[in-house]
Image (cartoon, helix red, strand yellow):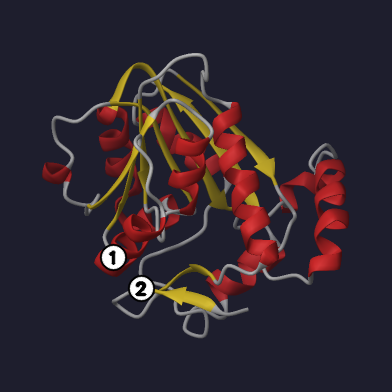
Amino acid sequence: MASIIDDRGYNQGFKLVESTVVRMRRRAQMFLDQMDLSRSGDVLEIGCGTGEISNWIAEGSAYSVLGTDICAPFIQSAASRYVRGNLRYEVVDFNDPAQVKGRTFDYVVGNGILHHLYPNLESCLVTIRSLLRPGGKMLFMEPNIYNPYCAVIFNFTRSLAKLEPGEMAFSRRYISRLIKRAGFAEQAVSYRDFLVPGIPSPLIRPSIALSAYLERIPIVNHLSQSLFIEAAK
């Protein structure tokens, strides 16, 4: 499966074939499903890449959406492809808290970005909490280290997959513990999605149906592709 490589030479996602577009749209909808769509406000996406999820959230809501990434070419591509009155993109390095200081949001979201921040994950969660308004939520989809596909990539084929040196998938227990220590008032971390990126188009619908079934089976759901992370300030 061809990857999207950033300006540092690291893999930051998958080429937009049909299955990856469907997968990302489903994740954007998961975020929207947890938002109060009866009102407006502000949403920050961390690690927006080439901008698709920020665009779909802006399309599906009245929120003002800010998509951020450290890769300037990604941001330039996103800004040229997706133009909406309630959407903008900026180059922001989330590892530098000064770049986001003073801003607040109703929601902070991300698709597969917290594991890139793994070396400083606890302090990053504290920063995310500081960016949320009272009652605000963070919503993230992250790779589950117990998924066989993820386990192989992160433990055995890192160089082949062009992973960043510090990035690492994690478990539900691990992220739950860090969220609690970061001071969030409440949290829910659930197992989601068995849809593998890059599968042939005829297998997409069966995979989605199977995923919905497997997510409900105890123990089996521990092998899901991702963890859906919700935490409120």
Q: Is residue 155 left or right of residue 97?
A: right
Residue 214: x %, y % from top left: 84, 45
Q: Is residue 203 left or right of residue 32?
A: right
Looking at numbered disc 2 in the image, what kind of residue is underneath it? Answer: Asp
Label 1's element? loop
- Which residue is under mark 1? 71
Q: CA distance from mark 2 to mark 1?
A: 6 Å
Q: Is residue 196 above or below residue 5?
A: above
Q: Is residue 214 above or below residue 36?
A: below
Q: At 38% across and 55% down in the image, what residue appears?
A: 118
Q: Is residue 120 left or right of residue 146?
A: left
Looking at numbered disc 1 in the image, what kind of residue is underneath it? Answer: Cys
Q: Is residue 161 above or below residue 151?
A: below
Task: State which quarter of the image contains the N terminus.
Answer: bottom right
**Mark 2 or mark 1: which comes first in sequence?**
2
Residue 13: x %, y % from top left: 50, 67
Q: Quadrant of residue 14?
A: bottom right
Classed neighbour count for the residue bearing mark 1: other residues with Cα under 10 Å, few (<14), some (14–19), many (≥20): many
- Which residue is under mark 2? 6
Label 2's element? loop
Q: At 36% across and 21% down in the image, what residue appears?
A: 41
Is there a contact, CB below 8 Å, between mark 2 and mark 1?
yes
